[in-house]
Image (cartoon, rainbow, N blue to C red):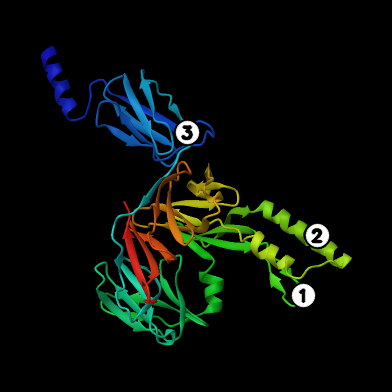
Amino acid sequence: MKVLLLIACIFLTGLQVFCQSITVRGKVIDSETKLPLNHVAISLNGSLRGTEADSSGNFMMVLPEKVGILNFSIIGYEKKSVKIKNNSTDPFIIELERKQNTLSEIVISSSPIETVSKSKRYNVLDYDFYNDNILLITYVDLKRAKLVLINQNFDTLGYKAIPYEPSRLFKDCLGNIHVVCKDSLYQAYYDGKRLDLFTPKSIRDFESILLPCIEQDSLNFFLIQKYGAKLIEEEFRPFYSNNLGLNYFYVNKKTRIKQPLITIEDEKMMIMSNDEAAFEKRKEQSGLKTIGDRVFAETVIFKEIYAPLYNIKNNIYIFDYANSAIKYFGKANQLQQEVPITFHKSLQFSREMQIDRKTWRVFALFESNGITELKDINLSTGLINTSYKIPFPFVNHIKVQDNYIYFIRKGREYDDTRYLARLRVN
């Protein structure tokens, strides 16, 4: 009987079912902030068995014995090994410490730059991704611009003349792409055979309906409303100051009920702006008012608030740069986690981000002396995973798709053509 039991145990072990297995549950948190860490890699020492912490830092793992060593690792934190000795039903709390003086790896890609649009005659004004294809506005003369659809092999699938002079492409929260002209915009569509444009919508409808809708998930649309701008009655040049606050809302797709998500304010800038207004008023009363001082302060010093919202793997994140935190919203759109960040305090931060919708990597953009650098952000830690420099100066319209960095550049030397190019990243 003992021999049969031993054989049975060996057989079951081969199927990864163990006679004395235990189930371990726990949560991984930051040792300093006590906030949960997601996507932490967890492995059983001496085996190929492993798992990963979920978006709330929780994990569950079956161990073959009552004693085992679990290894925990994530970029930006010190690795930690924990010995599991018992079969307690209470979850383990694993605290990881941040690495000190963590430096991101700077990668200047050795991959060749591929030119997507090869014609020296046609410039590329703008582009976006239409499913797995690329939609471009090309032109010799902007008044006779064309919409062109190409595939990943850069073969042309279709083209369509644009009725009026275009300014850019706009992708709405449903994923539809529109050509924006002066007084109207046209939605592009491709039926597998022909590229065409829908009946135009007015710019007024665009600004009131499409523009505020910035994202969606399976249940809701997410809307943004800016506030805090003031009319400045500057002599010879009345103007509106920058917005220093944002209201986010979500609208249920079925019920159409609108509810507040969060309000984000740049409180420091609001205080400074009010102080500047009071100071300017005192100068005016004293006859010392200087034309242009208020214009400079309100447009250059008190910058527009920047806190973009994204749906990443059906989870809502707000990158609150005004208050130095990545905000993660869990079930029922409740604020569940805030990860502190500091990378945006660099003077080179260009207040722009790109999300790779294929790999779900998140990049913040930096620029110095005409060279653009993309930094891959770790959502769990707020630290930089890796940085990529584009080895070409003064590029624009940067986007990331399926591990390729796309950008518009001008030709070399006497070639002023605007090309669409791409560069593969690791």
Query: Where on the picture, by quarter, is residue 147?
Result: bottom left
**Which element carries disc 1, helix, strand or loop?**
loop
Figure check: 395 above or below 237: above
Residue 312 visible in this rendered orientation of the protein: no
Residue that carries the numbered disc 1 in the rendered image? 235
Q: Can residue 50 be seen in this view?
A: yes
Task: Check disc 3 and give the amino acid type.
Answer: Ile
Query: Residue 186: percent from the left, percent from the top?
Result: 43, 79
Q: Residue 29 carries which label?
A: 3
Q: Which amino acid does label 2 sit on?
A: Phe
User: Which numbered disc covers residue 312?
Assistant: none
- Nearer the camera: disc 3 or disc 2: 2
Label 1 Cα neighbours within 10 Å, binned few <14 / some 14-19 / many ≥20 = few
Q: Which residue is drawn at 24% across and 73% down?
A: 155
Neighbours of disc 2 within 10 Å: few (<14), some (14-19), many (20+): some
The local secondary structure at tag 2 comes to: helix
Determine the CA span between mark 3 and mark 2: 47 Å
Callout 3 environment at 10 Å: few (<14), some (14 to 19), or many (20+)? many
Q: Where is residue 193 in the image (x, y as percent from the top left)?
A: 25, 78
User: Who comes first in sequence, dot 3 or dot 1?
Assistant: 3
Viewer-proximal residue, 289 or 1? 289
The reply to whether dot 1 and dot 2 touch (C-beta < 8 Å) is no
Q: Earlier in the sequence, mark 3 or mark 2?
A: 3
Q: Extreme front residue here?
A: 413
Q: Quadrant of residue 4?
A: top left
When the figure is inspected, residue 216 is found, relative to residue 240, above or below; the finding is above
